[in-house]
């Protein structure tokens, strides 16, 4: 670059110029000598670099003080190696925000596109049993997520060395004439970043991210239902440009149970009793979800479809107080086949307690419901249908 020029001279400002004046002077020079406006002009590129170097020192109070006192040598012995001689990309990455400010958002040097971005949220589907939903559970899950590549610090460039994108000249956009209009589109070569790797990072192949197998302990609270999403903050993909991780969402699905149909915190089941218990009443022991038994009292004279509610024998309310109920749907077991002795006793009963077939107009609603009942299978089918919004 030949002999060093004084930084104040480079920017054309007085030695006591304030920060605002220095910034404005640099802005003017950066636009004038910008490589986009001066393609294949090494002289302009040198001026562009010279101005960037001057601005870097004079915009920093500490460096400026050292320079004022001891000049270039002072800076060098202070550990600052002045100059962007090597690389335009250094300038853009260093002053990306300023350029974005100068040129307005992404229209500048892809400034906005190098900002840290939050990583993607991830989804994990977890299926648990109804018993697990009752007590809550902890599951170890393993997932693959993307994290920033360590050797290249997420840049995708070998040793983190970036250079200005040759295709868009660092703008992050390419402008094409189409039907008389000039249309700006995102540069594909650099994905709008304005920078490219000098050489692809061998660890990630230039992606900037690598896959990681992550094992996590997921705590599933009692009372969860199908459709509940559990959020694990910061366990998603790593962000671009050093941005924070996204979140992991665990989507819970509860496997249908063979004995109980769930409706919110309530558990429904069916109990078919014999004719004599339906008439005289009695009690039966039913298995309870999660173990043990629960006694169901059948009232005398019960009718098919009557409900017996056992308070608190359902599932805990998610995030709330107390538990749902167990709701037993009563029905009467009618034998399909009888032997001679049984048939004889039933006939005798009929003589003792004659029942004339009774017809009553119960209304279209009731009839419709009964037809529906006949068409579908058992209680489970009906309830599941209802829960599916049939
Ligand atoms: Zn580009
Ligand atoms: Zn890498």
Image (cartoon, helix red, strand yellow):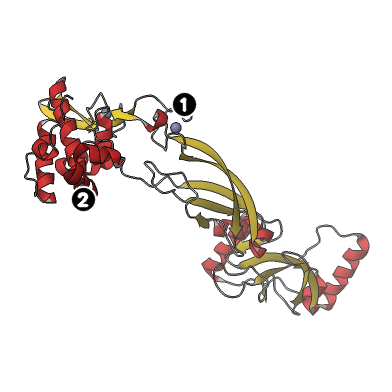
| Label 1 near ligand 2 (CB < 8 Å) | yes
Q: Nearer the viewer, mark 1 or mark 2?
A: 2
Left or right, 3 with respect to 301, comes to left
Task: Say which quarter of the image contains residue 27.
Answer: top left
Q: In the image shown, does 11 or 102 lie closer to the viewer?
A: 11
Eyeballing the image, is 38 above or below 63? Answer: above
Query: Dot 1, how many residues are within 10 Å of its Cα: few (below 14), some (14-19), or many (20+)?
Result: some
Find disc 2 in the rendering and name its residue: 61
**Reading the chain from its start, which is encountered first: label 1 or label 2?**
2
Q: Position of residue 3 (x, y in %)?
A: 15, 27
- The relative height of residue 35 versus residue 23 in the rendered view (above or below) is above
* Dot label at residue 189: none
Q: Is residue 100 visible?
A: no
In front of the other: 186 or 279: 186
Closest to the observer: 332 or 16? 16
Name the side, left or right, on which 42 lies relative to 214.
left
Quarter of the image for residue 130 reads bottom right
């Amino acid at each position: 670059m030949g002999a060093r020029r004084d930084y104040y001279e480079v920017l054309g400002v007085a030695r006591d110029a304030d920060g605002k004046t220095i910034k404005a002077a640099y802005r003017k020079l950066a636009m004038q000598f910008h490589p986009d406006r001066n393609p294949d002009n090494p002289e302009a590129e040198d001026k562009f670099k010279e101005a960037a170097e001057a601005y870097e020192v004079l915009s920093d109070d500490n460096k400026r003080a050292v320079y004022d006192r001891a000049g270039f040598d002072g800076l060098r012995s202070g550990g600052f190696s002045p100059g962007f001689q090597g690389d335009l990309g250094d300038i853009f990455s260093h002053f990306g925000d300023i350029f974005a400010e100068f040129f307005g958002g992404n229209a500048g040097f892809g400034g906005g596109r190098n900002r840290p971005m939050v990583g993607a949220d991830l989804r994990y589907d977890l299926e648990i049993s109804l018993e697990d939903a009752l007590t809550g559970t902890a599951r170890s899950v393993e997932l693959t997520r993307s994290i920033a590549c360590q050797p290249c610090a997420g840049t995708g460039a070998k040793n983190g060395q970036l250079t200005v994108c040759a295709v868009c000249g660092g703008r992050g956009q390419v402008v094409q004439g189409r039907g008389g209009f000039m249309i700006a589109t995102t540069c594909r070569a650099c994905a709008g970043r304005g920078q490219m790797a000098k050489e692809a990072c061998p660890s990630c192949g230039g992606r900037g991210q690598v896959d990681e197998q992550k094992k996590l302990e997921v705590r599933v609270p009692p009372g969860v239902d199908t459709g509940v999403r559990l959020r694990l903050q910061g366990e998603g993909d790593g962000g671009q440009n050093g941005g924070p991780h996204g979140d992991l969402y665990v989507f819970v699905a509860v496997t249908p149970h063979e004995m109980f149909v769930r409706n919110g915190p309530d558990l429904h089941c069916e109990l078919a009793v014999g004719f004599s218990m339906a008439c005289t009443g009695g009690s039966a022991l039913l298995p309870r979800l999660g173990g043990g038994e629960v006694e169901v009292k059948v009232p005398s004279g019960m009718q098919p479809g009557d409900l017996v509610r056992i308070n608190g024998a359902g599932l805990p309310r998610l995030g709330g107080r107390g538990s749902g109920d167990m709701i037993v749907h009563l029905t009467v077991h009618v034998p399909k086949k009888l032997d001679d002795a049984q048939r004889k006793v039933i006939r005798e009963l009929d003589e003792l307690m004659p029942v004339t077939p009774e017809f009553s107009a119960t209304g279209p609603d009731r009839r419709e419901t009964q037809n529906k009942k006949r068409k579908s299978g058992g209680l489970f089918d009906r309830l599941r249908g209802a829960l599916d919004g049939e």
